[in-house]
Structures are given as C-alpha cells and as structure tokens.
Image (tube, rainbow, N blue to C red):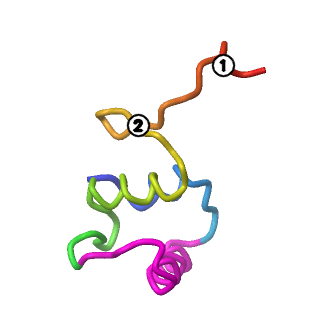
Amino acid sequence: MKTIKQLKKLINYAQTDDVFREYLKSLESAGVITINSDDITEKSVGDDFYERVANVFGIQLDADLNPVLPDAEGER
C-alpha cells in the first residue's frame, strides 16, 4: 500500500487530503477513474488504485510502483 501523501506527490497535487479525496470523487463522477470500496483508507491507498491513478496521469511505474524517469539521452 502507498500513502495518500505518496499519491498526491506522484501527481503533484498540493491541496489537503480532504480536498484530494473530493478531487478523486469528482474524477470518479466524470468517469475518469473507478474507486472501489477497498481502494482508499484514512491514510493509504491500495497498490492497484495507485497504479490506476498513475495511468490516468500518464505516469509510468516500475515493478515497485516507483515513477520511471525518462532517459537523459531521450530529452532534448
């Protein structure tokens, strides 16, 4: 499991946890994400949910759910 703080950092979200939860609910209402009953607890999110949100934001993760940074050679 990852913390809500880690998920917010992953997508560069800087508001409070309560506002973030409302933001996630608005994404769900818009059909962007699905939130299952066990995806979010008071301070953490499930790995599957973390990965789904990363995918929505176009963030590639490695096997340990860490963001994959682009190659320095690929940047110009």
Q: Answer left or right for 22 relative to 13.
A: left
Q: Residue at x 51, y 77 (%)?
A: 27
Mark 2–mark 1 contact, CB under 8 Å? no
Badge 2 element:
loop
Furthest residue toward bottom: 29
Which quadrant would the C terminus be assigned to in this image? top right
Whether the magenta-drawn stretch holds residue 49 is answered as no
Task: Please tell me which residue lies in front, 24 or 15.
Answer: 24
The residue that label 1 is drawn on is 74
Image location (x, y in percent) of residue 19: 56, 79
Badge 1 element:
loop
Q: As shown in the figure, which amino acid type bears the numbered disc 1?
A: Gly
Q: Quadrant of residue 63?
A: top left
The residue that label 2 is drawn on is 66
Q: Which residues are magenta?
A: 16-36
Task: Please tell me which residue lies in front, 3 or 52.
Answer: 52
Q: Answer left or right for 25 relative to 48.
A: right
Picture mark count: 2
Which is more foreground, mark 2 or mark 1?
A: 1
Above or below for 71 versus 19: above
Image location (x, y in percent) of residue 48: 27, 56
Q: Residue at x 49, y 59 (%)?
A: 56
Instruction: Say which label, 2 or 1, has the lower sequence index.
Output: 2
Furthest residue toward left: 38
State how far apart marks 2 and 1 are (Cα): 19 Å
Image location (x, y in percent) of residue 54: 46, 52
Q: Which secondary structure class fits the magenta region best?
A: helix
Above or below for 29 versus 51: below
Q: Answer left or right for 12 relative to 60.
A: right
| Category of crowding for the residue at label 2, using alpha-carbon neighbours closer than 10 angstroms: few (below 14), some (14–19), many (at least 20) | few
Q: As shown in the figure, which amino acid type bears the numbered disc 2?
A: Asn
Task: Please tell me which residue lies in front, 41 or 24.
Answer: 24
